[in-house]
Amino acid sequence: MMRDRSRLLADSLMCNFLHVSSKCTFTMGDGPMKRVRFSTREYVLSIIIATVCICLFVSIPAATAAKDDTAADNAKEVLEGKGLRKLGSYFSLTEEVDVKRALREIELLRKKLRDSQRNLDDADEVVEKKRKLTIDYLQQRRDLRARLARTTSVKVHNQLVTALNELGDRINLMHQDDSDKQQAKQARATHETLQAEYVEKLLKTRKLYDQVAEKYKDLKVDSDVSKAIETYNQSLSKPCKLGPGLSYASLGRKLKKIEDTVLSESIDLRKGGGNLWIVPVAFNEGKVQPMAIDTGASIISMPWNMAAAIGMTPTPSDEQMQVSLADGRIVTATRKMATKVRVGKFTVENVECAVMPQEFTQAAPLLGLSFFKHFTFKIDNANAKLVMSKVESLDGKSSGKSRRKRGSSR
């Protein structure tokens, strides 16, 4: 009887949910239909039982979900403490964003570097055209003077004198107007600054990239990270794993491609006289000569005997040029072009050189800007090293071009 009443109470619970009257007819077992009337106390008790059941039905899953959320939050806090955040299907280090930003900055610097190189090439071209025009005027003046010495006609003599005076005025004006050289100097300074900034940014980005890679290695063997990822994944429909992801590998390939366009080397130096650093320099077919680094000299200069030793002996047909020495003297030197000049693994072709007069036997061989202008370089005095870098253009050619120009040597 008690079991039958329990079943009737349960059926009554269903009736209450269906808003059915408390006076109901129920089927008990396999027997005939029986009509049962509940007391008020039994009816109230059924409502209480229904309420308790509903609360239990709702609260148990809610408590379980809350527990899961708390565990996920704790796991997330652990991962964030390790510098990780969820990015797509990976838990990635926040420094990945810094690497990506640095690569964008490198691309912008590279564009500026290309623009500055074009400006420098244009400025050097103007200087070169003016130099060639000056040489042409000087040759014309020599020819006119030769004709003047041979003529016997007064009329022709006067014409030649007038032409000589005009040529002299043109040559003087060209020597006095150095605006083209100043523009080239400014363009070169801008380019060298950008090139140094570009190389420095690239080195820092590589360092950052390698640091991130090392962090990932440490995180892979960190048990706290592994447990946190496992716990956090329980709250996700699709599990994630520890980075680096595919996007970071792509950043690495991009960085390597840019690095391949930059050649860098540290070259040993030895101390010479006058606090100058001496570096071995290979000319043409590998003939090596020690030379002093002089970044204040705009051209390579060498004594006569050194030029003869490397196969660059001056001839009467060679162009003459005026060079200024460190003591302020102006001397006439011979302009020669070295087929190749190499320092370490850095080579420049068709480099302008000044060969000092034969009587200047004690002239120091100086490695000047006609070579160094093609590179980013600095002298590490503490370690006696010449640190050189060369940036290539996107098409694989050198970012600097060998151009002929007049210069002074100190």
Image (tube, rainbow, N blue to C red):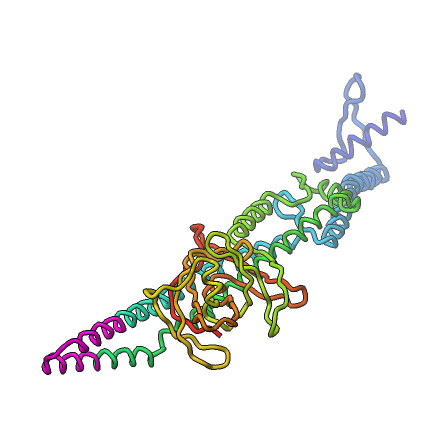
Q: Nearer the viewer, residue 197 or 209?
A: 197
Q: Quadrant of residue 164?
A: bottom left
Asked which quadrant contains residue 40, the reply is top right
The answer, for residue 62, to whether it is visible in the render is no
- Hey, which residue is sitting farthest right in the picture? 2
Q: Is residue 395 above or below residue 113?
A: above
The residue that appears at 10% across and 83% down in the rendered structure is 154
Question: 174 or 74: nearer the eye?
Answer: 174
Q: Quadrant of the N terminus?
A: top right
Q: Position of residue 268 (x, y in %)?
A: 62, 60
In this picture, residue 142 sits left or right of residue 109: left
Residue 364 relative to residue 132: left or right: right
Q: Position of residue 251 (x, y in %)?
A: 57, 49
* Residue 314 rendering spot, x and y as whole percentages: 39, 64
Q: Is residue 389 magenta?
A: no
Q: Closest to the observer: 271 or 385?
A: 271
Q: Residue at x 42, y 77 (%)?
A: 331
Q: Report the residue at 30% width, 77% height from top.
A: 174
Q: Main secondary structure of the magenta part?
A: helix
Whether residue 152 appears in magenta in the rendering, the answer is: yes
Give the image quarter of residue 48.
Answer: top right
Q: Residue at x 47, y 77 (%)?
A: 325
Q: Is residue 271 above or below residue 170?
A: above
Q: Position of residue 205 (x, y in %)?
A: 60, 56
Q: Can you see residue 262?
A: yes
- Residue 363 is left or right of residue 215, and the answer is left
Write down the region rendered in magenta.
Answer: 137-165
Depicted 270 relative to depicted 339: above or below: below
